[in-house]
Amino acid sequence: MNTIAERLELLREELRREHLSAFVFPTTDPHNSEYTADHWKGREWISGFTGSAGTAVVTLQSAALWTDSRYFIQAAGQLKGTEFQLMRLKMAGTPTIAEWIASELSTLNAQLSTEIGMDGMVNTVAVVEEMKEALRQKGGITVRTNFDPLARIWRDRPQVPRNPVEIQPMELAGEDVRSKLARIRKALHEQHADGMLVAALDDIAWTLNLRGSDVHCNPVFVSYLLIASNKATLYVNKEKVDGEVLRYLKEQGVEVADYAEVGKGLQDYFEYNILIDPDEVCYTLYQKVTRNIVRGTSPIAAMKAVKNERERLGFRSAMLRDGIAMVKFLKWLDESIGKQTLTEISVADKLEALRAEQPLYRGLSFDTIAGYEAHGAIVHYEATPETDAVLQPKGLLLLDSGAQYQDGTTDITRTIALGPLTEEQRRVYTLVLKGHIQLQLLRFPEGASGTQLDAVARKDLWKAGYNYLHGTGHGVGSYLSVHEGPHQIRMEWRPARLHAGMTVTDEPGVYLEGRFGVRTENTLLIVPAEETECGRFLQFETLTLCPVDKAPIVREMMLQEEMDWLNQYHQRVFDTLSPHLSPSETDWLREACAPLT
């Protein structure tokens, strides 16, 4: 395999041949996915950076990579020894991609091209248009979107996945496809659209009650769905759908065509107009549309975010089994630390094995983050054989993990004391726990946004001079993507309103580089609280069932309402899980859930 330097030289040869001065590599695929199949990991291939968010840009003489705070430490390590310069998003002095490109191109020979490349198949309409406008203002730099250099230089590039598609049973989906299509068409009509192109893979899987395995940790399949007023067509590699799935789709009023024919399908689209979500649909397909385009937000994400009764029951069942696995793991860890050699990788493997014993287990929902001490400060750390730390009977282990069960997706973080801690560790742990609890104590008006709730989880941290740059919470799919929108709880403005039936995580944290990190996370369900003369109020039901480590808590820092919440939560964890555990596991859990006084 080529080194990064060799890959950059191959790329630059192609750029010179095509008379381009730079090329932009996003993290996404033709479906604007957060997590992508290996075939589309071009940014990773060209830069060596493996994080799930970032953009690489290569000019004829330089290279840079932009990523967010979750990956600053990881990216610095992975880019070391390459010519890539790390650009830290949202940090003072960091130029935008357009600013950097303009600056770099200004130093090139004036006779060279002022055109750059972006593959229109893996960049959305919004991203391309924004870049075009930003570069136009920087001296008339233009953008070409019909070129993919990776098709020529990535010689061992993985194939597009061809894994089979399977049906999600109605007893778990809770609503059939015809009903969902009817609701989508009604929403499109309200936006004055006759149809839409659905590009997001989890939206397609949810709409059609189908699941796949094309993307690591995400039960989705590569496809497009074209919805018209009286028909719907799934564009998918036909090797992926067997006779049973074909019959099922036909019964639900869905036709099937080959994945590569989606462009022709858009050209042949027969309705008066079509909704295109510029934040989801790629630029190349947008240009294929021959009818009137209604630019708007896809209605599917908001529908998918509100879980129906069957999905809510599935979540509770999945969380029960996940809690059983977590308790078995925590007991094992407690009894093993200091007595046998444990590493970050070995504890992650042990937890995965315990989850795999549970019914309806379908795999991890993301790669486990097991960060011991200083590694816990790397927000999305993933241990490798080179970094795999040996756990000692002291300090903190940050363990962020989750599973895909056929009836629900889980996401949980626990920070665990492996032995004696510093006063700073105990103080930070307690501040994070206070924020975690305060959010779950909150009642709020229906229709509030997550941004309006975010400060509740941060206020004690802010008072003590701490903060974290990632979001406080994200939606969670029903046997779908572990990160689901459109709602989020975060500092940055997110207008999506919160409604009963939505799932969302609660995961404040603090990360002190080179020392340690702390995060505590539960997955929550938004449920009705009460209705007053001022309107309808909502609250959170905690779905996650797993004890919170009490050992690091500084009791004097806890409010009585916070201690009461923790004790009530632990009582529910014990009452729910203990009937499913062995006597020794029950005894361990009883102590782990003993009241904090």
Image (tube, rainbow, N blue to C red):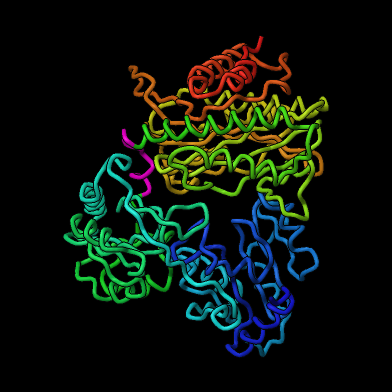
In the rendered image, which quarter contains the N terminus? bottom right
Residue lying at 39% horizontally and 42% vertically, measured from the top left: 305
Residue 341 screen position, x and y as percent? 78, 40
Looking at the picture, does residue 387 appear above or below residue 593? below
Is 533 left or right of 136, judged from the image as shown? left
Specify whether residue 448 is in view: yes
Q: Residue at x 65, y 67 (%)?
A: 99
Main secondary structure along the magenta-highlighted residues: helix
Magenta highlight on residue 302: yes
Does the magenta portion include 518?
Answer: no
Whether residue 92 can be seen here: no
Quadrant of image for the C terminus: top right
Residue 210 coordinates in the image, percent (x, y): 34, 53
Specify whether 560 is left or right of 568.
Answer: right
- Please tell me in which quadrant of the rendered image residue 248 appears: bottom left
Residue 535 location in percent, x, y?
A: 34, 23
Region rendered in magenta: 301-310
**Compared to 146, does 511 lie above or below?**
above
